Amino acid sequence: MSYWLDLLPSNEREKIRKRLRSPEEYERLREKVKGPEDLEHEMDRNERMAEARFVLESEPKAKEMLRRQIAEDLQSSPPEVVLDHVPASILKGNFDVVIEVHPQTKEDQVFVIPEGNVREKIPVKQVFSEQYVSRLLSGGQTKL
């Protein structure tokens, strides 16, 4: 069986081998490798987000509580602190809350969806997203 590297001309093969042996390339590949602590942290976070997503989908009271908390935070602090960008309909309190995968980071995050014709998802800042998930999982007893 021939490998794709064997099908290239020898000067091209040498360039690729040299590049793959470079310290910079080794370091870049090394950064992609996750250690056991990183994997454990990622698994815990994924488990919490899955549980929070289930709570949001199965308990309307929890979803309403989270929506009210986000609306309260938008009123009490500058909206740009909580959300990436803020349409006018969200400031009026007309929005829904979901947990979905962020397109850039590929991690689960809390999103705000404005009601009406516009169906864009606006991500909540990561710090607030973590706080909301923690509060949602604790049953909403603790005040943020």
Image: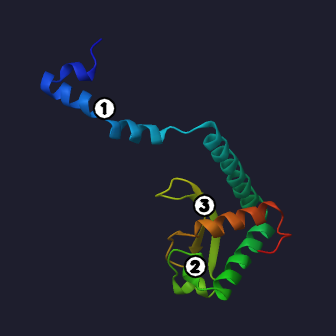
Location of residue 58 (image quadrant)? bottom right
| Residue at position x 47%, y 41% in the image | 32
* Three-letter code for the amino acid on which mark 1 is drawn: Leu
Query: Which numbered disc flags the more N-terminal residue, 3 or 2?
Result: 2
Is 61 situated left or right of 104 in this image? right
Query: Which quarter shows the N terminus?
Result: top left
Query: Which quarter shows the C terminus?
Result: bottom right
Query: Which numbered disc flags the more N-terminal residue, 1 or 3?
Result: 1
| Residue at position x 45%, y 37% in the image | 30
Q: Which residue has dot 3 on it? A: 109
Is 106 situated left or right of 55 in this image? left
Q: Which residue has dot 1 on it? A: 20
* Three-letter code for the amino acid on which mark 2 is drawn: Val
Is 65 situated left or right of 35 in this image? right
In this rendered view, identify the residue nearer to me: 60 or 140: 140
Q: CA distance from mark 3 to mark 2?
A: 16 Å
For the view shown, which residue lies furthest in the top direction?
Answer: 1
Q: Which residue has dot 2 on it? A: 81
Residue 6 x %, y %: 22, 18
Secondary structure at numbered mark 1: helix
Q: Residues within 10 Å of mark 3 (few under 14, many from 20)?
A: many
Location of residue 14 (image quadrant)? top left
Secondary structure at numbered mark 3: strand
Query: Which numbered disc flags the more N-terminal residue, 1 or 2?
Result: 1
User: Which mark is nearer the camera, 3 or 2?
Assistant: 2
Q: Is residue 87 above or below residue 6?
A: below
